[in-house]
Structures are given as structure tokens and as C-alpha cells.
């Protein structure tokens, strides 16, 4: 049984028409991922992103140490934007980000059991639990990332008041204000363009083969002769790289440059190679499904005493 909510979800993920989504789900027996692939093969959907629907509230927060040799990015979730704007919740996220720079933990479980940075009498989990009791809303430290580097810097960028956060690490023998600005530019690029990979060598074979097959079916569905299909596939793969690989992307601040070219030009000016060694991008609530409430129906239920 294909429900209206399934059709709605598929439409939100692909941008395809309602009836196309319904047919795709019917043909794939309700398998969401297969339906996305089918719509793409028919040229009816854009490339599926690896993140799910964004629904949860909370904040993404960064902390950069003095000297910019280390930094952290954390996501702390809550149920409503009212709590996300609460000063005590904001302070909690700041403290957790500061603690994440110092941690040796590799999992949320380990991190949550650490002594809380501002009160050794409690753990991180205790601090979260205490604020839950005070504000009456569920909260959780969902994830964290920590970077450290000797020859280079770590920089962050937070967009939308904590909706999107980026942590980026640049390696370079020289460190000055120019390098700091470059790191900011790269972090803003990542926030805006949401690359999935650093460069085309980082695209795993399974993902690449899946994309090739989709492009192959698209070309055949367009009636292209098989002898030119492979050339079309490779052309679309190169276009895919430019969309999902950071170094291949067009720089958002200057369309005449890719990020790779921008870094090459700045390296020449600085007299030292500048390389993006790693990055992470958190978007608040990505992949978390949040129950949708119909406000009118909720009021009606309360009036009827249900």
C-alpha cells in the first residue's frame, strides 16, 4: 500500500511530480531508495543527497582554540526552537563544543560519560539531564568532531544562527591573516555547496558505479545510440564530480575559479602550498525524522476531549 506520506516524502527528496512519485513507488513496491533511482533514470529527479529530511531543532556549535591549531564542531538537539533560543541551552552547547576540543573520546557514549567541563561533580550527560528537567524538553548531544593540526590551521563557519556548521582543516607551512581568510572562504563554500567528497579520488567505487549506471540508463532512455552512451556517461560523471567534490566545485565567491584553482593561486601568492586536509559539515537535524503535527487537528482533539 503506497501511502500519501510516502509520496510526499519522495517528492520532497527528488522534486519530481506527485503522480511520477506515486508510479515510481508502485513500480518499486514502496522501496524509497529504488524509487529515487528509478526517477533519476527517467530524468525526473535530481541526484539524491546522502542526508535525510531536516526536522529536529537545536544548535550546531563550533569552538576554535587559541592559535587555531585545533577545533571542534558539535550538534546538540532539542524539541523546539524556543528551547534552542534559550540562554541556558546556548550556554550548554558552547560548553560542549569547548569540551569537544579537549576530548580523547571517539564515541558519543564515551564523550557523554566525561566529567563536564564547568562542573567536575557531574558528567556531560548529567548536565544535559539537569537542563531537561529544568526546561521540560528532551535534549541530546547527537554528534561531535575534533580536528588538530601542527602545520596549518583549523577554522569554522556557522550559518543561520546554528543551522549549519562547518569545520575545516588546512595544511600550510606559513600561517598569517591571509591563510585565516582562505580557511573562512573554504568553510563558507562547504556550508553553501555541501560537497560530499574532498576530491574525485575520494569517491568510493560503489557510489561511482551506481552513478554511472543511472547515467547509462538515462542516456538509453533518451534514445541515444549505444556507441555514444559511454561518452555521455563519462561527461555526466565529470559533471557529477563538479557538483559533489569540494576541489572541483565552482567557488561561490568567484565563478571563474574552482576551489582547486583558488587554492593554487593563493598558494603562489603566499609562497607555500595550501591544502584542505579534511572537513566536516553538520546540518541541524539532518537524517532525523520529526513527527509532523496538524495544529488545527490538535486543537480539535483538545476541544473534543480526546
Image (tube, rainbow, N blue to C red):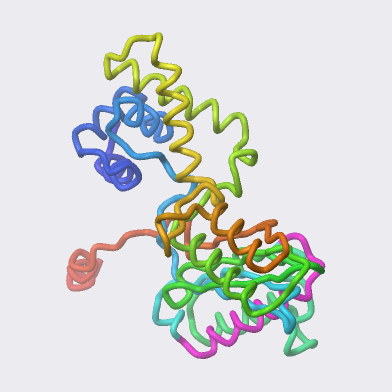
Q: Is residue 153 visible?
A: yes
Q: Is residue 12 left or right of residue 280?
A: left
Q: Is residue 98 magenta?
A: yes
Q: Is residue 23 left or right of residue 52?
A: left
Q: Of residues 200 and 7, which is closer to you in this image? A: 200
- Residue 257, relative to residue 56: is it above or below? above
Q: Please tell me how many numbered marks the rendered image carries.
A: 0
Q: Of residues 57 and 139, which is closer to you in this image? A: 57
- Image x and y of residue 217, in percent: 38, 19
Q: Residue at x 25, y 66 (%)?
A: 306
Q: Quadrant of the N terminus?
A: top left
Q: Which residues are magenta?
A: 86-107
- Image x and y of residue 17, in percent: 21, 38
Q: Is residue 263 left or right of residue 79?
A: right
Q: Is residue 123 magenta?
A: no
Q: Residue at x 53, y 55 (%)?
A: 259
Q: Main secondary structure of the magenta part?
A: helix
Q: Is residue 293 left or right of residue 119?
A: left
- Image x and y of residue 142, in percent: 60, 64
- Residue 25, relative to residue 163: is it above or below? above
- Place residue 154 in its image quadrant: bottom right
- Image x and y of residue 162, in percent: 48, 74
Q: Residue at x 46, y 58 (%)?
A: 251
Amino acid at each position: 500500500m503506497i501511502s500519501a506520506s510516502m509520496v510526499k516524502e519522495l517528492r520532497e527528496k527528488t522534486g519530481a511530480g506527485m503522480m511520477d512519485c506515486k508510479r515510481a513507488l508502485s513500480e518499486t513496491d514502496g522501496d524509497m531508495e529504488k524509487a529515487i533511482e528509478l526517477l533519476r533514470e527517467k530524468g525526473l529527479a535530481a541526484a539524491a543527497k546522502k542526508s535525510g529530511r531536516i526536522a529536529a531543532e537545536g544548535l550546531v556549535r563550533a569552538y576554535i582554540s587559541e592559535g587555531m591549531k585545533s577545533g571542534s564542531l558539535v550538534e546538540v538537539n532539542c524539541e523546539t526552537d524556543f528551547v534552542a533560543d534559550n540562554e541556558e541551552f546556548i550556554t550548554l552547547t558552547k560548553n560542549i563544543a569547548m569540551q569537544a576540543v579537549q576530548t580523547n573520546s571517539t564515541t558519543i557514549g564515551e564523550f557523554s560519560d566525561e566529567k563536564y567541563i564547568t562542573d567536575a561533580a557531574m558528567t556531560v550527560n548529567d548536565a544535559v539531564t539537569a537542563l531537561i528537567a529544568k526546561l521540560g524538553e528532551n535534549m541530546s548531544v547527537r554528534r561531535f568532531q575534533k580536528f588538530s593540526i601542527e602545520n596549518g590551521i583549523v577554522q569554522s563557519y556557522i550559518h543561520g544562527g546554528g543551522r549549519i556548521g562547518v569545520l575545516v582543516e588546512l595544511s600550510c607551512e606559513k600561517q598569517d591573516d591571509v591563510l585565516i581568510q582562505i580557511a573562512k572562504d573554504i568553510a563558507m563554500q562547504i556550508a553553501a555547496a555541501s560537497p560530499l567528497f574532498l576530491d574525485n579520488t575520494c569517491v568510493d567505487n560503489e557510489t561511482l558505479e551506481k552513478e554511472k549506471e543511472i547515467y547509462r540508463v538515462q542516456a538509453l532512455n533518451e534514445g541515444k545510440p549505444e556507441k555514444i552512451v559511454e561518452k555521455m556517461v563519462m561527461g555526466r560523471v565529470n559533471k557529477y564530480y563538479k557538483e559533489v567534490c569540494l576541489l572541483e566545485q565552482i567557488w561561490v565567491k568567484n565563478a571563474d575559479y574552482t576551489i582547486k584553482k583558488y587554492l593554487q593561486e593563493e598558494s603562489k601568492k603566499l609562497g607555500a602550498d595550501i591544502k584542505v586536509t579534511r572537513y566536516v559539515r553538520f546540518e541541524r537535524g539532518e537524517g532525523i525524522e520529526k513527527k509532523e503535527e496538524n495544529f488545527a487537528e490538535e486543537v480539535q482533539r483538545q476541544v473534543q476531549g480526546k
